[in-house]
Image (cartoon, rainbow, N blue to C red):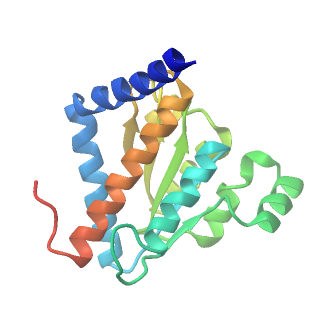
Amino acid sequence: MLKYIKQQIQASIDTKQNILNDTKLMETIIEVAKECVALYKNGKKTLLAGNGGSAADAQHFAAELVGRYGFDRPSLPSLALTTDTSNLTAIGNDYGYDKVFSRQLEGMGNEGDLFIGISTSGNSQNVINAFEVAKSKGITTVALVGRDGGKMANIADYTLIVPSNDTPRIQESHLLIEHMICDIIEQEIFADGVSS
C-alpha cells in the first residue's frame, strides 16, 4: 500500500514536471490569464463547463473568481454552467444532454466574454456544442484538456493540453492551471501584478 501511494504521488509530480518543461503550454497559460484580465477590465465575464470531475473544476474555478483566491478584493463575474439543476434537467429533457451548455451560453453569453470548456478527453460533445455557440457570439474559447486535446483542441482559440493520458493526473493538473490563472488575474487587477 505504501509503495502504491508513493507511485501515485510520483506520477503526479512527473506530470507537473512535464508541464514545467512545456514552454508552449506555460506561454498559453499566460496568454489565457491576460485575456481574462483584459475582459474583466472591460466589464465582461467568464463562463465555464465540463462533465463529472470537470464540472467540479468549472465550479471551483468560478468560485475562486466570484469569491476570492488569495486575498480579499471585489468579486469578479464568473459562471459555471454546471450548477443550475433546473436548467440542466429542462434543457437535457427538452433538447438533449448534448445541448445543456450550448443552450445556456446562447442566453447568458455575450460578445467579449470568455468560455472555458474543461474535458480530460477533449471530446465531450456538449462542451464542443458550447464552443460552436461561443464562436457564433464572439466569445473567446479556451479548451482545458488532456491526452491529444481531442476535437476541442481544433476549435478553441486557446488550448491548454496537460501532457498525460491518465485522467486523475490530468484533473490534478487542470486544478493547478486553474489556480495559476486565478492568481494572475487577481494579482494583475487588484495588486501590483506578478513578475514575468
Q: Is residue 130 visible?
A: no
- Vertical side of 176 occupied by 35: above or below: below
**Towards the viewer: 53 or 36:** 53
**Towards the viewer: 151 or 174:** 174
Taking the image as shown, residue 132 lies to the left or right of residue 186, namely right
Residue 172 placed where, x, y %?
Answer: 47, 38
- Vertical side of 73 occupied by 128: above or below: above
Q: Is residue 112 visible?
A: yes
Q: Residue furthest top?
A: 3
Residue 123 placed where, x, y %?
Answer: 59, 32
Residue 23 placed where, x, y %?
Answer: 20, 33
Q: Residue furthest right?
A: 93
- Vertical side of 17 occupied by 140: above or below: below
Taking the image as shown, residue 38 lies to the left or right of residue 58, namely left
Taking the image as shown, residue 121 lies to the left or right of residue 85, namely left
**Towards the viewer: 164 or 9:** 9
Residue drawn 25% across and 75% down?
189
Q: Residue furthest front?
A: 2
Residue drawn 59% across and 43% down?
128
Q: Residue furthest bottom?
A: 74
Taking the image as shown, residue 81 lies to the left or right of residue 16, namely right
Residue drawn 66% across and 39% down?
125
Question: Which quadrant is home to the N terminus?
Answer: top right
Total numbered labels: 0
Q: Quadrant of residue 114?
A: bottom left
Residue 37 placed where, x, y %?
Answer: 29, 68
Residue drawn 24% across and 51% down?
30
Q: Quadrant of residue 100?
A: bottom right
**Towards the viewer: 54 or 28:** 54
Q: Quadrant of residue 79?
A: bottom right
